Amino acid sequence: MSAAQTFLNRLEERLSERQAASLPEPTWIAARRQAAAARFEALGFPTRRDEAWKYTDVRRIGEGDFVLARDAAFSKATAATLTLPIEAIRLTFVDGLFSADLSDLSALPSGATVEPLSQALANNHEAVGGALGRLSGVEFSPFAALNTAFTEEGAVIRLAPGTVVEQPIVLQFLSRANEAAVMSHPRVLIEAGARSQATVVEHYVGETDAANFTNVVGEVLLDRGAILKHYKLQEAPLGDLHIASLHVDQGRDSRFTSFNVNLGGALVRNDLVADLNAQGAEASYLGLFFAQGRQHVDNHTLVNHNAPMTFSNENYKGILGDRARGVFNGKVIVKRDSQKIEAYQSNANLLLSDRAEIDAKPELEIYADDIKCSHGTTTGQLDEKAVFALRTRGIDEQTARGLLTLAFAGEVMEQVDVDAIAERVERTVAGKLPERFNLAELVDASLNEVHDAGLGEE
Amino acid sequence: MATEEMEKLVRREYTQGFVTDIESDTVPPGLDESVIAFISQKKGEPEWMLEWRLDAYRQWLKMKEPSWAHLNYPPIDYQAISYYSAPKKPEDRPQSLDEVDPKLLETYEKLGIPLHERAALAGVAVDAVFDSVSVTTTFKEKLAEAGVIFCSISEAMRDYPELVKQYLGSVVPKGDNFFAALNSAVFTDGSFVYVPEGVTCPMELSTYFRINAANTGQFERTLIICDKQAQVSYLEGCTAPMRDENQLHAAVVELVALEDAYIKYSTVQNWYPGDEQGRGGIYNFVTKRADCRGDRSKVSWTQVETGSAITWKYPSCVLRGKDSVGEFYSVAVTNGRQQADTGTKMIHIGEGTKSTIVSKGIAAGNSDQAYRGLVKIGPRAKGARNFTQCDSLLIGDRCGAHTFPYQEIGNSSATVEHEATTSKIGEDQLFYCRQRGISEEDAVNMIVNGFCKDVFQELPMEFAVEAEALLNVTLEGAVG
């Protein structure tokens, strides 16, 4: 049986279950499901011979046998430790299924809708049908096709024109330590009307011993002048396999910022694609990944400058220790006649071990001449002079290296404006560093000091 | 416009250059084992060489033409190509410069090519060029005195079979890639250089001086071996538009640098780029690779690519020796409908290896060009260092410039840096020059030459001067 077939059998099972339970399904979803399944069957899982997967081997996923979760039960006490400590509008999914218990929509202002996909489909499936799948067709990748075939749950966020959502909207995806590994194919759909503003956080986290497969597809539609900050904080359990793609469609003068932080997971692949379709659209990509042990983290980003006077800026930082492997592939495409655009890209990587590896490929594809484009990428080690400077001040070598590594990550993290995320990341990074002197405590102390002085609060 | 003029000029020369009568010992189009046996026999090659070629051919049959490059061209029919034709007889060539198209001579004038070389370049029968014959003889004597072997690869197979057997295919194996395999099966000519231990080659070597082979075949094979502590500088090609009736070119160049050896390989490529629709231009699929086998060896590639309809070329360095150094300096200019996908690979294997990549791409008209490079740092390449800079300059809004740099870094003590920019000639730069009474065309030339300076200064002196002139001619009429 081929790897793809195992997955398709699971889909069959699920569909007959749904039928037995007489769960209704709009015909367009059924048709799309079928087409996606056929597409996935034809494609199969990507191999390293596919240019987009040259450095990432997904056989572990293809060879696995994952079941679909049946309930969303999760210990409240554990959830409390995992949840980001911020006041937020929150949707929680456990192994892909919606958990009403762990969700909180009380702070939702009028003009904004935040609901699980299943509910949105039940309420008014036609309203979802127009946007869902518009940006991420099954053509994008075998995983997008797989996700479409399994479409069932996820989050739908809709902002009416002019709506400003003050509190962050947190989509929390929890991974459980199950007896049989579970897969989930969540879908995220964000439609931001003209001049609306919001911050959306996708947070992936779970029980330490979990080893599940998450395959998420997100779509973001930004109308004229909409401003969206999208945070992805991926601190999935170290056994988790995580594949994600996010597609953004930007209208005139819209602004999209992506913070993509990846700390967890055994095998992680992120695809981020923004289409700047009208004048004045601006996209910023900020990324940080830190992998250790045998973690594999692959980030593919793409910016399509489809219209004149559009702007993009990208800064990704990677830290790799032990036998970890990192991949960065950043691509900027400037279409013909997209004049007066500016596109900047930068990627810096830090290798902490001789057995770690980074494969970087910053690409430019340019068909217009009146533009400013540049990219730079560097890979190296900590500056020995800086290590020495700290040592002359009585800081031992390990701690000095730890501090400098934190500072390296800090260049991206200081632009994060949700404090809880910045703190969580700083603590996690500090906790991961090898040290004699307890760096985590040092960070803790300094963060507490900030809190005591009231500096961290707005 | 001046561009059209230029293209017209180039095209006219080529239609005139065709020779239609078929020589008795030209094989009909097509490729099979008998054609390879024929080539091998014609060249009077030893048995092992024929076996080598046949093995390459059998590997080639199993290979697929690569399609990953950012290039667009109709499929090539490999059975429609004739793989061997005897060198043209002197009586078929123009007998003196008077018979050569005056427009072509005008281009030579612009490029500042020395008089005696013009005749050779225009394809004037060698015997009619009395000057260069004596020049060649003098050079040959000097080289022999130093112990440097410089001859055609066919001669080398006959006279130095042991050297050829030892090194041929040791850098670019027979089955390395589609075009290299094809070349290995059917190559008909090329240069062979061997510089013995401790010898610094007394002069720059160039195919110019191997006049008999000046009319190089479409499947050229070059092998350069630099023994311990030896040094050589090799010049390939020339700045003048080259006449050639073969559309497909698939050359292989292999360089071997032993301990402390230094090879400098400079190329100026200006094959026919095709008409304004890109028809009829040369397809140039070249595999160039250097093996820095010895510790502290150094190889430096410098290339100025202005011709060909299609350029597919990645001069590379395998940095095996400890502290070995690889360099790649490139200027690629495309205009009209030209397409170029070029770059380099630096494979760091040895400790302390260093590489520098400077690539300058200039795209004008409807052309497209891509830099494609790989920097690979192996786990044992402690302290390896790479610096890459690739800049693109766009002239006009119908052209494209692309960058595809791959970095695979597997050593924490390595430092790898990559920088790329894409821009156009600034209006204010142009204005500044115009304000001082410099014509727009001169101003553009000045700015473009400044943009390429880092590469040009790596070229041997006389080449550099010609390259600058060449750039100006290639971009004639591209702006304004």
Image (cartoon, coloured by chain):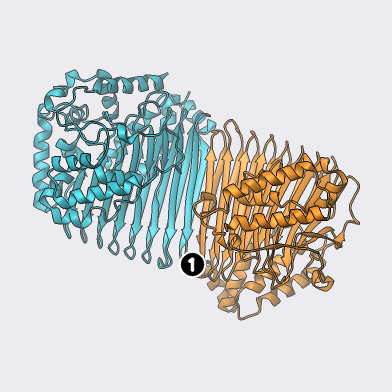
Chain colours: A orange, B cyan
Q: Is residue B449 visible?
A: no
Coordinates of residue A311 in the picture (x, y in percent): 65, 41
- Residue A425 falls in which quadrant of the image? bottom right
The residue located at (21%, 61%) in the rendering is B228
Q: Quadrant of the N terminus of chain B?
A: top left
Q: Nearer the viewer, residue B47 or A1?
A: A1
Residue A411 appears left or right of B16: right
Q: Nearer the viewer, residue B225 or B421?
A: B225
Q: Is residue A75 visible?
A: yes
Coordinates of residue B38 in the picture (x, y in percent): 17, 40
> Is residue A2 shown above or below B412?
above
Q: Residue furthest bottom?
A: A436
Residue B29 appears left or right of B445: left
Check disc 1 and give the amino acid type: Ser
Residue B478 appears left or right of A138: left
The residue located at (45%, 25%) in the rendering is B440
Coordinates of residue B417 in the picture (x, y in percent): 48, 55
Coordinates of residue A76 in the picture (x, y in percent): 84, 71
> Is residue A309 shown above or below A106?
above
Q: Nearer the viewer, residue B382 or A169?
A: A169
- Circle 1: element type: loop
> Can you identify the residue that label 1 sits on?
B412
**What chain does badge 1 belong to?**
B
Mark 1, other Cα within 10 Å: few <14 / some 14–19 / many ≥20: many
> Is residue B215 shown above or below A206?
above
Q: How many marks?
A: 1
Q: Nearer the viewer, residue A115 or B195?
A: A115
